Amino acid sequence: MFSRNLRNICRRYSQNVTFRTVEASPAQQNDNQIGLFYTMDKNLSKKLFGQGGLPKSYMKQTKTFTETSLMVRQPALDVIECIKSSDLNQPAIRYVLYGEMGTGKTLTLAHLIHYAHDDGFLIVHVPGVSQWLWKVPRLKEMSNSQTREGFVDLPLDAAAWLLHFKSQNQVLLKNEDLKISKEYVWSKRETTPAGAPLADLVEQGIARVKYACDVIDALVYEIKQLSNNNKCKTFVAVDGYNCFFYPRTRLSTPTKKVVMSEEVSLTTSFMEITKNDWKNGVIVVTVEDISVPRDHQESYLPRYLLYKKGFEHLDPFVPVKVDRYSEKEFLTCASYYRDRLWLRGPEQLESELKLASACNPYKFMELCAPL
Amino acid sequence: MSHVIKTSLKQITPITRYFYSCGKNPNLHNIRFYSNKVTTAHDDIYKNFTDWETLNKKKKISKPMRAYLERAKEHDEFMKKQQFEYNIGKRHLANMMGEDPETFTQKDVDRAIEYLFPSGIYDPAARPLMKPPEEVFPARKAAEFDEAGRPHHFLFYTGKPNFFKLLYDAAENIQLLQQFEDKVIRKKATPDPNGKLDLNATLWLTKDQLEQLLVEKLNDLEYDNFKLVMERLASLPYSYRIKDFIEKYRKSLSSQKFALEIPKPSYDDQGRAFVTTYECLRKKARGNVTIHSPGTGLITINGKDLTYFEDTQSREQVIFPLIFTGLEHKVDVECNIEGGGPSGQAGAIRWGIAWGLRSFVDKSMLEAMQVAGLLTRDHRRRERKKPGQPGARKKPTWKRR
């Protein structure tokens, strides 16, 4: 028993191996660490991704491995390098992560969010657009918008997102500098005065779910104002961004009319924040084929997934391709799995797995699970 | 002859015999026990008997003989009839096929039958056939005793004379080889290393095959004894001296027919060897596979890589021959495939890769591939749905009322 514990401890803290790096801060990582795993602090990962943000299967795996390890990969490093070297006083630059299913777009985004958190950005992170518009339960709580004619609100989703926003920006929201610029009147009795801290606005949305969508609208406006005034710098991350541009949604009004994606008030809010008419911001979005229905999954390229409308909306953007594992990345991943006792068996197993998974990270993870 | 004298001496003193066999292996004792009677009934001795019994009875036919003669006559007539029918049938067939009946051989008959009665039945034994009657009807033993009812064979009363004769011969050969070994040791010579018997490529006859050869029914114990004695015989250092005897009871493991037909690889303009296999098929899938020899393990299926197949099983099917031969990083594979579904396409590619890899592997690997079933084509097709039931074989749920 003791020896097993000792072995486990040795394994857990065996930082001195070829597949790990001790450099846990994404800002400090460089090309030498490509393909190596770094372990995120437990509290931090709970804070950043406790409300979503990591894929479900990966969350399961982190629970099994008792640690949140991310691989340092080229696309993430490239984007970090770009963010570092770009001038934030220029209009916000938009990065679009794209790639095949299961290559790690969402995890690259998680890596970038970690970087943004360490670098003091205000994080506006949407973990899954498709959960709002497409992969929805049959009876979704929705209501017609009070303030805007012909729009549909998703109050529960909006409130959940505000909670996520709050937990991701716990530290920054305590900052007294972040004040709202104008007064918001929600109802006869409820108002948020000008000059109140931004946290109040968020709290209002969480407490009064009915107004959550309007709060998000206001929040987006205020964040843009604050960024423009150099009060804060903002990192916008949207996972499955192309879902906003797929014409239909699976929502339907009580009269059985199918809701179009542009009729959802959340869509307009996040379209607003992904425009580049503001500064002091970084916008990273991912486009993925699995967040839209089967009939529109023929290609993973941004132009196809975003349609003409979305492509023109984002137009000057930096496309970043997330590719499958390279030879080295595959080997480190395999040795990481071996270290976690997730993968066992002879050495020849790896070459077979490599061929069978075609170096696709998700497929590799799936294949290793029953081994 | 000396052997005969020795054993007959033993018979005179039964106690020595007992002691003699006691110290040996109990199984060998079995064999000796089977064969100890035979030595007295050697052919020479047999001829020396005065056949006064027969003489007395003046060639009176015994009861079993009469019964046998009746049966034999019946069988002969039956076979004659069958033979006649076969010959007639063959002539008809030859006329039907527009060939000369005189030169129409069994091979032509088989071909004609296959042409006239095409059958998709998977098991070849169940397909229509036309064979000479001696192949179709099992051989029967000829009379084992003369007209006086006296058996010809010295082991007749064991009930299975051919089988026990085999064991007897084997035991005798063991003794002879041991004597020879003693002689060699006395001369201080060493056994010839080249003369070693190679039994890797062959197997002992199975029980059914042995039964067919001996025309006698055997039980499991007897078959085990046969294997035991033959193993022992084959393990002796000078067993190559009786190679013919041993090989009569062995069957080759795999046929070597692939050795002749393997195509030589062609060379493209970059000097790379390549082999193309056409007509790779399984289920409804059809395609061709090209293998380029110095490669890096690149697999191209209809212009895509292995992600052409989404499910793991199909991918495993495709890479299996490469992994089996250990060439997964040494060759490039290019496939064009169409028709059917993923599993059919994967199976067709698997066969195509294995078939093409024959040109790049050595002989032992070829045999291993053959044993692994990589070179066997899967001719199974989808079975049609039958009317009155929900599927090909599935019956409606049984309900009493």
Image (tube, coloured by chain):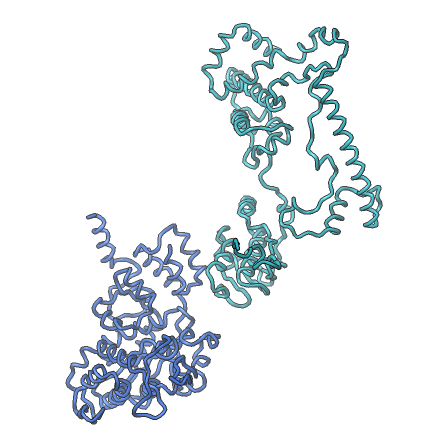
Chain colours: A blue, B cyan
Closest to the observer: B259 or B393? B393
B341 with respect to A31 (left or right): right
- Classify residue A7 as left or right of residue A355: left
Image quadrant containing the N terminus of chain B? top right
Name the residue rendered at 51%, 19% in the picture: B30
Q: Quadrant of residue A9?
A: bottom left
Write the residue at 62% across / 53% down.
Answer: B264
Indicate whether B394 appears above or below B160: below
Residue at the spot 61% in from the left edge and 30% down from the top edge: B211
Answer above or below: position of B186 versus B386.
Answer: above
- Outermost residue, front direction? B401
Instruction: Indicate the position of residue A325 as horizontal and vertical percent values.
Output: 39, 65
Residue at the location (40% across, 75% down)? Answer: A291
Query: Compared with residue B69, is residue B279 higher up or lower down, i.e. above or below?
Result: below
Asked whether B380 or A77 is in front, the reply is B380
Does residue B274 show up? no
Where's residue A367, x and y in %? 40, 59
Image x and y of residue A160, in percent: 27, 78
